Amino acid sequence: MALNTSALQHTRWHRFDSQAAINQAALSRILAAAEAAIATSGSFLIVLAGGSTPKAIYQLLASANADWAHWHVYHNDDRCLPVDHDERNSKMAREAWLNHVPIPANQIHDIPAELGNIEGAKAYSETLKGVRPFDLVILGLGEDGHTASLFPGQAVDNSADAVPVFNSPKPPVDRITISQQRLNNTHEVMFLVTGAGKQTAVDQWRSGEAIPATLIQSPNGVDVYCFGVALHP
Ligand code: 6PG
């Protein structure tokens, strides 16, 4: 597999010794990013990761103190399932956090994945039109090195801010993802990586293999918060 050495230079690895420690560090990072963004631009644009890893952090946010009126929430991807399906990333975030804090409803931007991947992607691209660079993009890492719904062996589609995904190796097959290019239009990126299942992907990443996670870059580099994986030299 090709080497992506530039990605290696701007990636900072942070290893934590407990789930509580990584959760607390991620919470602090998010709240600090929010404070800085609101002070600078009057708003905080955060893009949420799906999957299971971030849920505990979203639950901590549910009881955090923040200037919620100035938060704008987006999702980096979602699965093409009914709105109330338990596997929807937007449902997980609402139940763990967003239903419990006073972020204005029109500032929470679920991906309309229930419309199907083509129509839903078009609608979300409209939602993202004119939106300034994100302040913080939170991402997970799949065991195969995927992130958001950018999967190994699939062409990178930067034709719009949100694009349809077909034949996803992680069910369901139809998804919608914010494109690589639009995810990279952000001030900060924080990956959350927990569990031995991610070890191979982390080793590939650190040895310079161009797994999909290395597609994500930002001017300020990328921070990878890890627990339960070893950071081999
Ligand atoms: C999804 C996510 C996906 C996820 C990784 C890690 O919709 O599944 O966007 O990219 O972040 O697969 O998932 P876990 O946190 O469940 O390991």
Image (tube, grey):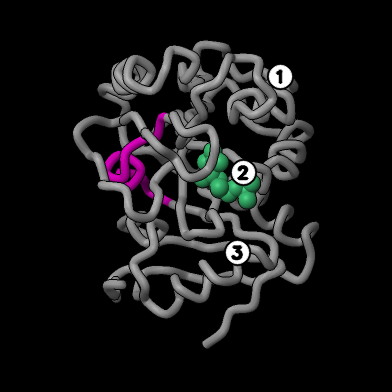
Viewed as shown, does residue 4 lie left or right of 112? left
Q: How dense is the environment of label 1, judged by Cα within 10 Å: few (below 14), some, or many (20 and up)?
A: few
What residue is shown at x 31% (from left), y 48% (from top)? 154
Q: Is residue 233 above or below residue 82?
A: below
Q: Secondary structure at mark 2?
A: helix
Viewed as shown, does residue 167 lie left or right of 170? left
Q: Which residue is mark 3?
A: 198
Cα–Cα span, label 2 and label 1 = 18 Å
Q: How dense is the environment of label 2, judged by Cα within 10 Å: few (below 14), some, or many (20 and up)?
A: some
Task: Pick whichever, 150 or 18, lies toward us.
Answer: 150
Q: Which residue is mark 2?
A: 31
Cα–Cα span, label 1 and label 3 = 30 Å
In this picture, which residue range is highlighted in magenta? Answer: 176-188
Mark 3 beta carbon near ligand 1 (under 8 Å)? yes
Q: Which residue is mark 1?
A: 99
Which numbered disc covers residue 137? none
In the image, what residue type sits under mark 1? Asn
Mark 2 beta carbon near ligand 1 (under 8 Å)? no
Which part of the image, by quadrant, shows the N terminus? bottom left
Using the rendered image of the protein, determine whether residue 85 is visible from the camera's viewpoint.
Answer: yes
Question: Between disc 2 and disc 1, whose residue precedes?
Answer: 2
Q: Are marks 3 and 2 in contact (CB under 8 Å)?
A: no
Task: Pick whichever, 131 or 117, lies toward us.
Answer: 117
Residue 206, x across and y down, in percent:
45, 76
